[in-house]
Image (cartoon, grey):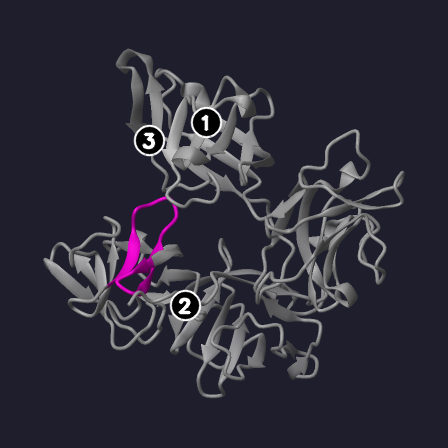
Amino acid sequence: GPRMVEPDDPLVVNVVGRHKERENQDLQGEYHMIGMVHGRAAYRKPGTRTVIRYWPVADRWLIDREGVQESDVCNAYAEQGGARHPAVEELVWRVWESQHRQHIRDPEFLVTAAPGTIQVLGRASGKENWALNGEYKLIGLHQGKVAYQKAGKFKHAIRYWRVGDRWLIDLEGLRDVDICNAYADAQSTSYPGEIRLSWHIWDSTRQRHILDSSLCTLVTPSCIEVVGRESPKENMAMNGSYHLVGLHAGQPAYMKDDGSGHAIRYWPREERWLIDLDGLRDTEICNAYAEAGGTGAHMHPGHLNLVWHVWETSRGRHLTDPAVRSFVAPHSVRISGRDPYKENSTINGDYELVKIVEGKPSYKKVENDHVIRFWPAEERWIIDLEAGFHGGDVANAFADAKGAENPGNSELLWYVWETSRGRHVPDEDVIAEAIWLPQVDWSKVPGLD
C-alpha cells in the first residue's frame, strides 16, 4: 500500500561536494521534499525541475533534471542499499560524464540532511581567535563527516578530526592536522551545529585550549525580517531587519544593527518570542509576542506561520495583528540581463523587500511602483511595472516558481512580454539574484557593550 512520509524523512536535503569545474556540478544545492514517488520521499531543487527520486526497478536513488518521470534516465544515481531516504551519507553516487558516456563514481559527491549553514557566535570581540565567529556553509565531506567553510576570502573551516572524535574550528581551513583554533568533543553529533557542544579555544599565553562557555555553534538564520505594522497604529518601529547577536535564555536572539537596540528574544517561562524595542532583558514586558510552540528542532523567530500580538496602549493589552510577519528572505532582489534595446528592459534594477503578498515575500523598487510578487493561481513570480501590488495576473514578466520561496533565485527562467509577438517570450539572459544583508560587526554598532 501507499507509504506515508516517515517522521525521520528529512524535509530538506543538501547536495554538495561536486568539483565546480566538473560536469553536472549544478546539481548541487538545497532540495525540498515534494511528496512521495514509488513509496519514498522525493525532493526538488527550488526554481528547477531537478528532483531526487526513487526508482524501484533498479532499487536506486536518481537525480534527474527532467523531474518526476517513469524512467531510469538520470544525471546521477546511487545504489539504494536499504536507504529509506536519499540523504544517507554512506551512499556512493555516480555522476554522468559525457566524455566517458557513462556515470562515473564520485566519492566526494554527497547528499545529506545536515544543515546548509551553521552560525558560530559568542566569542568576545577583540579576544584572541574571535575571528572564528561567523557563518559557515556546508561544502562536503572531510574525514568521513560533513565540513563547513566561510564564504568569501577566508579559509576558516569547521571539520571533523576522527582520531579524537572531535569537531575542529580551523582558521587555516580544511587540512589533515590536529592543529586548530577551537575544538569540541563530537559526542556522536552528525554535524557541528548543536548548541550542546562545549568549545575549547586556543589561548597562546597559556599554550593550551581553554573552555569558552559563551561560544556556541547553532543552526539559525543570520537575519530575520519583520514587516507589516502600518500607521496609524503604534509600534510601527518594530518593522525592520534583525540580525543574530547571540544567545538569550538559551535561544538565538536578534537585534537591529542601527543602534536602536530593538530586539527579538525568547521568553522561556511562557515559551514565546518577544519583540522588545527596549532590547535584550529578562522580563515578559514587550511590544509584541508570538507563541513559539511547534517551530521545530531549530527554534528561531523567522517562521512565517508565527502569529504576532502587538501592544495597544488604548486597550491596555496586546492585540493580534495578522499583517505583522517575521520570516527569512533576501533583503532585495536584483533583476539584470534584459537587453536595454528590447521591450520591458525596465524590469532591470533592484527591488527591496516590502511586505508579504499571497503568503510570500514581495519586492518593490524604491524609486517607482515596479514590483515583484507571487501569483498563486499559476504558481508564478510576476514582475509588474504598471499596477504594482494591485494588479492581477497581468505581468510584464513572469517565472514559474517551481517551489522557489522567494524570487531571488538565479535558476528561475523569466518570460518577458513582447507586443510584436503577442506573448511572453523566454529570455535566458534575465537573472534574478538574491541580495542578503551583510553580517554585522557588533563592535561598530553604537550603544552596544
Q: Name the residue under label 3.
A: 429
Highlighted range, magenta: 36-54
Q: Which residue is drawn at 67% across and 71% down?
A: 215
Q: Nearer the viewer, residue 6 or 106?
A: 6
Mark before the other along the chain sequence, 2 or 3 = 2
Q: Name the residue under label 2.
A: 9
Mark toward the viewer: 3 or 1: 1
Q: In the image, is 309 to the left or to the right of 343? A: right
Q: Residue at x 28, y 77 (%)?
A: 82
Quadrant showing the C terminus: bottom right
Density class for disc 2 (Cα within 10 Å; few <14, some 14-19, many ≥20) is some
Mark toward the viewer: 2 or 3: 2
Q: Which mark is residue 383?
A: 1
In this rendering, the count of numbered labels is 3
Density class for disc 3 (Cα within 10 Å; few <14, some 14-19, many ≥20) is few
Residue 236 lies in the magenta stretch: no
Q: In this view, does 230 lie above or below 204?
A: above
- Amino acid of disc 2: Asp
C-alpha span from label 2 to label 1: 36 Å
Residue 61 visible, this angle? yes
The residue at the far front in this view is 1
Q: Nearer the viewer, residue 421 or 376?
A: 376
